[in-house]
Amino acid sequence: MNWADIIVLVLAVILILSVAVQQSQDSVQDAFSGEKSELFKNQKARGLDLLLMRVTMATSLLFVGMVFVSLLLHKNA
């Protein structure tokens, strides 16, 4: 296990936590009824939601990049 594998594991944990903390855009009632409320569809993320969205995007890009780095390191080893 090299440094790239450790970074991938840390990024995976951060990615899981950032997705788990985000608020859902759908209500529970819509999930069971099959309806989709269009009232709040075009609202932009603000505050903590915006921060979590940006952290999730950045972490996912870093995660994918580090997975490729890790694969290259294991291929050459």
Image (cartoon, rainbow, N blue to C red):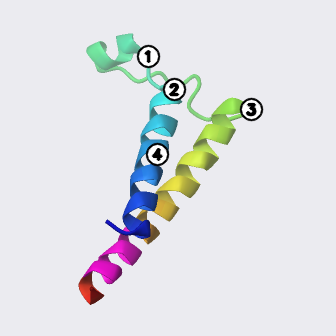
CB contact under 8 Å: marks 2 and 3:
no
Mark whose residue sits in front, 1 or 2? 1
Please state which amino acid type lies under the numbered disc 4. Answer: Leu
Under circle 1, the secondary element is loop
Under circle 4, the secondary element is helix
Circle nearer the N terminus (4, 2): 4
Under circle 3, the secondary element is loop
Q: Main secondary structure of the magenta part?
A: helix
Please state which amino acid type lies under the numbered disc 2. Answer: Glu
Under circle 2, the secondary element is loop
What span is in magenta? 67-74
CB contact under 8 Å: marks 1 and 3:
no
Residue under numbered circle 1: 27
Query: Which numbered circle lies on residue 38?
Result: 2
Tell whether position 71 is magenta.
yes
CA separation, marks 2 and 3? 22 Å
Circle nearer the N terminus (3, 4): 4
CA separation, marks 1 and 3? 20 Å
Q: Percent from the top left, x then y, of residue 41? A: 56, 31
CA separation, marks 3 and 4? 19 Å
Circle nearer the N terminus (1, 3): 1
Please state which amino acid type lies under the numbered disc 3. Answer: Gly
> Badge 2, how many Cα within 10 Å: few under 14, some, many 20+?
few
Mark whose residue sits in front, 4 or 2? 4
* Residue 5 versus residue 40 in the image, above or below: below
> Badge 3, how many Cα within 10 Å: few under 14, some, many 20+?
few
Query: Which numbered circle lies on residue 47?
Result: 3
